[in-house]
Image (cartoon, rainbow, N blue to C red):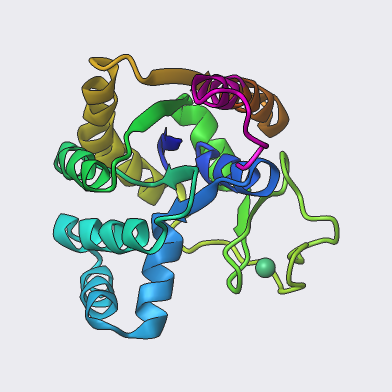
């Protein structure tokens, strides 16, 4: 099963991707994590990504697509995937279809995280991240157990430099211009489920989980229903 999460930065899709990973065993492909890993490894792809990011640009499509291709090749035995932050534009969405086809897979559902801009600004200025493991917190909606400390690795949390209103606005604009059309692309194939992500994380999760559990059940019964739960 392949799930795509679409939404502006800060809509909470990263957290939902983590939950899918932790609770339902979905293999999470987060573009942010892939960039970080590739840069750390310093291979050719990592160098490309690093150069592009250093220029203050988004990582180019060809680089992003190559990263996803590698990820899919590595994971032949993986059953369920969740993609967070990919595809980011139509170009990537089209390339993604052929990558999946090569692997005999297809997208099962696209969750579209809908949130009004005002609410997003409010949320992002309260966001804190772990510089070590990438975990994301929110002082209001998802605070860490211990103040300002990562629950997972005990590292001191930081505020991202670009979580200020002006930068949020320009990122939201890029998202509206480039990613919202991706929703249209998938809508034509009846894959889109719109989630109101302006509510609590827990409520969003219940919606996402309910839908996916039903889908997983359908998948299993389609295959004869005799299998163990393997996801
Ligand atoms: Zn951490």
Relative vertical location of residue 157 with respect to residue 65 in this rendering, above or below: below
Q: Taking the image as drawn, is residue 31 in sight?
A: yes
Camera sees residue 58: no
- Residue 168, picture quadrant: top left
| Total numbered labels | 0
| Ligand 1 located in image quadrant | bottom right
The quadrant of the picture occupied by the N terminus is: top left
Apparent side of residue 177 relative to residue 220 in the rendered image (left or right): left
Looking at the picture, tell me which residue is in the foreground, 144 or 27: 27
Residue under the point 25% across and 30% down = 182
Question: Outermost residue toward the right?
Answer: 146
Q: Residue at x 69, y 24 (%)?
A: 206
Q: What's the magenta region?
A: 214-231
Quarter of the image with the C terminus is top right
Percent from the top left, x then y, of residue 160? 51, 62
Residue beneath the point at 49% across and 20% down:
222
Q: From the top left corner, tell me how far across and down residue 105 is, in percent.
A: 32, 39
């Amino acid at each position: 099963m392949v799930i795509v999460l679409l939404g502006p930065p800060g809509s909470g899709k990263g957290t939902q991707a983590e939950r899918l990973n932790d609770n339902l065993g979905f293999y999470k492909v987060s573009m942010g994590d892939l960039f970080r890993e590739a840069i750390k490894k310093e291979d050719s792809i990592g160098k490309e990504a690093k150069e592009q990011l250093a220029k203050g640009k988004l990582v180019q499509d060809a680089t992003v697509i190559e990263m996803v291709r590698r990820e899919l090749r590595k994971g032949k035995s993986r059953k369920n995937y969740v993609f967070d932050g990919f595809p980011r534009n139509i170009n990537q969405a089209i390339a993604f279809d052929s990558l999946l086809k090569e692997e005999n897979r297809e997208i099962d559902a696209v969750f579209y995280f809908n949130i009004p801009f005002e609410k997003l600004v409010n949320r992002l200025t309260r966001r804190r991240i772990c510089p070590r493991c990438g975990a994301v917190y929110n002082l209001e909606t998802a605070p860490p157990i211990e103040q300002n400390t990562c629950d997972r690795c005990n590292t001191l949390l930081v505020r991202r430099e670009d979580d200020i209103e002006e930068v949020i606005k320009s990122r939201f604009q890029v998202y509206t211009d480039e990613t919202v059309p991706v929703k249209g692309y998938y809508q034509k194939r009846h894959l889109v489920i719109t989630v109101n992500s302006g509510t609590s994380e827990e409520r969003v999760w219940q919606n996402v989980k309910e839908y996916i559990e039903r889908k997983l059940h359908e998948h299993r019964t389609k295959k004869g229903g005799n299998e163990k739960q393997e996801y």
